[in-house]
Image (spheres, helix red, strand yellow):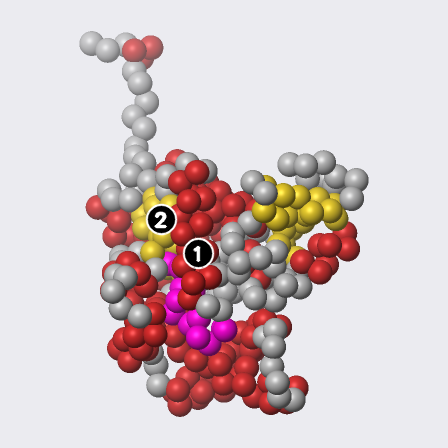
Amino acid sequence: MTTPTQCRPVRSSPSHEDVCAAILDALLPYRRTLDTGHADTPDAFPAQLRQLAGPVAAGEPIVFALPGFPCKSPNPAKALGPLPDEGERLALRFLDELCARVAAVHPPGARMVICSDGHVFSDLIHVPDRDIDAYGDALRRLIRDEGLSHLEVFDLRDVYGDDMSHDAKRSLVHERYAPALEDLRSLTRSDTPTRRLYQGITRFLLEDTVSFSGTRSALQRDCRRRAYGVIQRSRAWGDLIAEHWPEAFRLSIHPQPRGSAKFGIRLLDAPDVWMTPWHSCLLQHADGRRELMHRADAERLGRLVLRQGRPSHFIARGGCDG
């Protein structure tokens, strides 16, 4: 007979629901949103819990799909140049560490598919396809050199190969997946998150247009037109991603409200909720804190640091290299 001192407590395994909630708990501190005044708890995100339920129940890795990392802004007052810099390096390290945190509560682990979307709308944002190729290739090298084993990059070259022109690839994506322009215009008028997205992209296009021969009002009209095109293509890219990874947990670099099928993720600290590493550069403060800001602002506050001979980031005056 077993004596009381020989008994061992039976530890029950966490339920699938508990695991899904724990995974979402790991993401919630980094949620990118315009919502205020609400405490974030996993049960407030039923769409995301449903996305996690399948792979958790099957004991499979979680696949995160994140559209973004398209290319650097062409505005020299925003970014340091056409290639990834310290902002991208730290953002990629953060995403890899996030996957590792998920693995701590879900042993099958997680992987992050970075769906680099620059080629999808390069004609609309006026960035040459050769610069987007160089940016995407540098991202892959950065992931390899940093040993970020949870990350991979996916772009239009992975969908259609290298034998077709980028214009032809964009046409195929647009024709097959893009929503009708009039439907999108109507949604922009009636749906607050869509209107905010349209306004944010219009602002980016205004800031990133480095040469325009017309009047300011003509530029504004042109950017509003292109903003609709960017949203059309972005949604088309999202539908293409959904075909390739139908079970993926959908992340977004744009702010997302509760109830959205996508979960907004904040990559690094920034004063503007819309700011990304590719629309800015990084400033390291004297206390070690790192923040994204436009190059023109960072130059006033710090000194430039080179990494492997290329501009990397700024160190606030009085701070130490990190």
Q: Residue 151 placed where, x, y %?
A: 38, 46
Which residue: 65% across, 89% down?
215
Q: What amino acid does circle 2 point to?
A: Glu
Sequence-first disc among 2 and 1: 1
Dot 2: what SS?
strand
Q: What amino acid does circle 1 point to?
A: Ala
- Please provide the residue range marked out in magenta: 115-126
- Image quadrant holding the N terminus, namely top left
Q: Nearer the viewer, mark 2 or mark 1?
A: 1
Tell me if residue 25 comes above or below residue 216 in the rendering: above
Which residue: 29% across, 52% down?
53
Which residue: 32% across, 22% down?
9
User: Of the numbered discs in the image, which one, if any, rests on residue 134?
Assistant: 1
Dot 1: what SS?
helix
Residue 258 vs residue 34, the one in the foreground? 34
Give the labeled residue for mark 2.
152
- Residue 37, image quadrant: bottom right
- Residue 143, image quadrant: top left
**C-beta proximity under 8 Å, tags 2 and 1:** no
Tell me if residue 128 comes above or below residue 55 in the rendering: below
Residue 144 vs residue 188, the one in the foreground? 144
Q: Residue 50 placed where, x, y %?
A: 31, 58
173 displayed left or right of 43: left
Q: How crowded is the residue under tag 2: few (<14 C-alpha within 10 Å), some, or many (20+)?
A: some
Give yes or no for residue 119 being in the magenta stretch: yes
Looking at the image, which residue sits at the far right?
Answer: 318
Which residue: 59% across, 75% down?
209
Q: Residue 254 placed where, x, y %?
A: 50, 64
Residue 88 vs residue 61, the one in the foreground? 88
- Image quadrant holding the C terminus, namely top right
Give yes or no for residue 302 being in the magenta stretch: no
